Image (cartoon, rainbow, N blue to C red):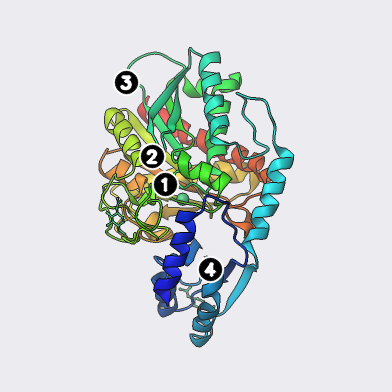
């Protein structure tokens, strides 16, 4: 029975290029109260019918999971049999996706080559903005194409450098490695916008270089706009399902934990490390620049977590104290302007163990001491679908945290 459901879900994705509809998909919230309950929820992690929006990470911490219609009855029966409380927070995911489409179409601006924070920009609009500012500000902005995606899109970023001299520390920022986490690319774009187009911020690139890649998984990102809103992976085809979770595909303790070898799973780690062109592109950039990168920030959503390595083990990194203290500074800067609060800690201890993530790789292999995976705020009950009106407050408050990161890097390395 389970196998048939797997097969149907996968065929659905392979055969149709029509938009995928989430009619009847429900989102459940469950609070595991015992270790057994947490393990039960964790055991569903790899199954394609279950899409965890918030992973089982600790006792008494809320788990959020989207469940396909054909699986809901047996899931609810299991929960009842185990005496676990649950609630349904979204009764029909399709309706939240439709609401978002409606808001997107109403708030869309049209000026090409400019940036907008009132709607979620398409990939070609993002690239066009980067080309435009590289042309308008040739003294400080250099366009970078770090590679191509599986479907042949350029993976585009910018280097922002306002001063001279060799030996300048670099802050590397990426966003959008998980396609559906729509709030991440605007955060990266706002950093670019503020560094380049707001002259009051010139001091921030005087002594420090920034390299910012706002959409690391453009095929997946476009697919979330055209077909399947909650697509997470790359778009590499395989025999029965598409895509690899790029944030399980980095070659550092690859496949050790929290990753799947089932090509239909949302956390499929790929046939080999760096099987994906997108992760290879970042790897190549990293190995060519590892000596100057002093801080790596990778933006995800959601849940308000400032995470740092390790993701593959609960052992703490050597510089745990420094990583934690810097996280506190950043959180304080954000909280001071908006009240938004982040939980700070290592991925394994705060979220859940997962090997093959980019932040573990950057620290473990490239030797960059300071690496953070930032799970931005989400859209409340609607998770990955924050209202377009929440782009502004999120990018602005996050920018305060990014400036705190800069101040630390300048203080320590300049
Ligand atoms: C979880 O909550 C229950 C009931 O509220 C409480 O008895 C238990 O100590 C809590 N466990 C943890 C680890 O917080
Ligand atoms: C397809 O996925 C399977 C795992 O389900 C893997 O063993 C195989 O190497 C993949 N093939 C390609 C071409 O990625
Ligand atoms: Zn993510």
| SS of the residue under disc 1 | loop
Q: Is residue 162 above or below residue 185?
A: above
N-terminal label among 2 and 1:
2
Q: x, y (%) of residue 264?
A: 39, 60
Front label number (4 vs 3): 4
Which numbered circle lies on residue 167? 3
User: Which residue does the numbered mark 4 point to in the structure image?
Assistant: 67
Q: Which mark sits nearer the N-terminus, 4 or 2?
A: 4
Rendered image: mark on residue 234:
1
At mark 4, the secondary structure is strand
Instruction: Kindly check if marks 4 and 1 are in contact, taking CB atoms under 8 A apart as contact.
Output: no
Q: Residues within 10 Å of mark 2 (few under 14, many from 20)?
A: some
Image x and y of residue 408, in percent: 43, 34
Query: What's the distance in space between the residues labelled 2 and 1, CA to CA?
Result: 8 Å
Please give the label number shown on residue 74: none
Query: Is 336 left, or right, of 328 in this rendering?
Result: right
Q: CA distance from mark 4 to mark 2?
A: 29 Å
Q: Earlier in the sequence, mark 4 or mark 3?
A: 4
Foreground mark, 4 or 2, reads 2
Residue beneath the point at 44% across and 44% down? 177
Q: Secondary structure at mark 2?
A: loop
Helix, strand or loop status at disc 3: loop
Q: For mark 2, what is the residue?
A: 150
| CB atoms of marks 3 and 2 within 8 Å | no
């Amino acid at each position: 029975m389970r196998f048939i459901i797997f097969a149907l879900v996968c065929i659905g994705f392979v055969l149709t290029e029509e938009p995928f509809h989430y009619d009847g998909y429900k989102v459940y919230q469950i609070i595991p109260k015992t270790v057994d309950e947490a393990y039960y929820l964790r055991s569903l992690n790899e199954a394609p019918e279950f899409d965890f929006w918030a992973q089982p990470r600790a006792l008494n911490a809320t788990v959020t999971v989207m469940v396909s219609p054909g699986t809901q009855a047996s899931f609810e029966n299991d929960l009842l049999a185990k005496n676990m409380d649950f609630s349904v927070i979204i009764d029909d995911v399709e309706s939240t996706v439709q609401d978002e489409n409606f808001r997107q179409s109403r708030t869309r601006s049209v000026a090409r080559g400019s940036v907008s924070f009132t709607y979620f920009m398409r990939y070609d609009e993002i690239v066009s903005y980067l080309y435009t500012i590289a042309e308008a500000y040739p003294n400080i902005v250099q366009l970078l194409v770090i590679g191509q995606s599986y479907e042949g899109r350029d993976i585009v970023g910018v280097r922002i450098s306002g001063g001279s001299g060799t030996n300048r520390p670099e802050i590397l920022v990426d966003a959008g490695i998980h396609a559906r986490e729509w709030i991440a690319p605007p955060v990266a774009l706002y950093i670019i916008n503020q560094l380049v187009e707001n002259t009051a911020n010139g001091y921030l690139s005087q002594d420090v270089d920034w390299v910012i890649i706002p959409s690391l998984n453009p095929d997946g990102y476009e697919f979330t706009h055209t077909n399947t809103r909650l697509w997470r992976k790359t778009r590499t085809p395989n025999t029965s399902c598409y895509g690899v979770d790029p944030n399980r595909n980095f070659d550092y303790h690859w496949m050790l934990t929290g990753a799947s070898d089932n090509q239909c799973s949302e956390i499929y780690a790929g046939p080999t490390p760096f099987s994906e062109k997108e992760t290879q592109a970042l790897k190549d950039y990293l190995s060519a620049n590892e000596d100057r990168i002093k801080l790596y920030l990778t933006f995800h959503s959601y849940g308000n977590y400032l995470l740092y390595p390790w993701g593959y083990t609960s052992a703490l990194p050597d510089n745990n104290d420094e990583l934690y203290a810097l996280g506190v500074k950043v959180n304080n800067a954000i909280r001071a302007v908006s009240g938004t609060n982040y939980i700070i800690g290592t991925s394994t201890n705060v979220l859940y163990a997962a090997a093959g993530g980019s932040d573990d790789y950057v620290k473990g292999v490239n030797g960059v001491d300071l690496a953070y995976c930032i799970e931005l705020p989400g859209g409340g009950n609607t998770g990955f679908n924050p209202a377009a009106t929440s782009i502004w407050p999120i990018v602005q408050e996050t920018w305060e945290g990014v400036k705190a990161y800069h101040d630390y890097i300048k203080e320590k390395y300049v």
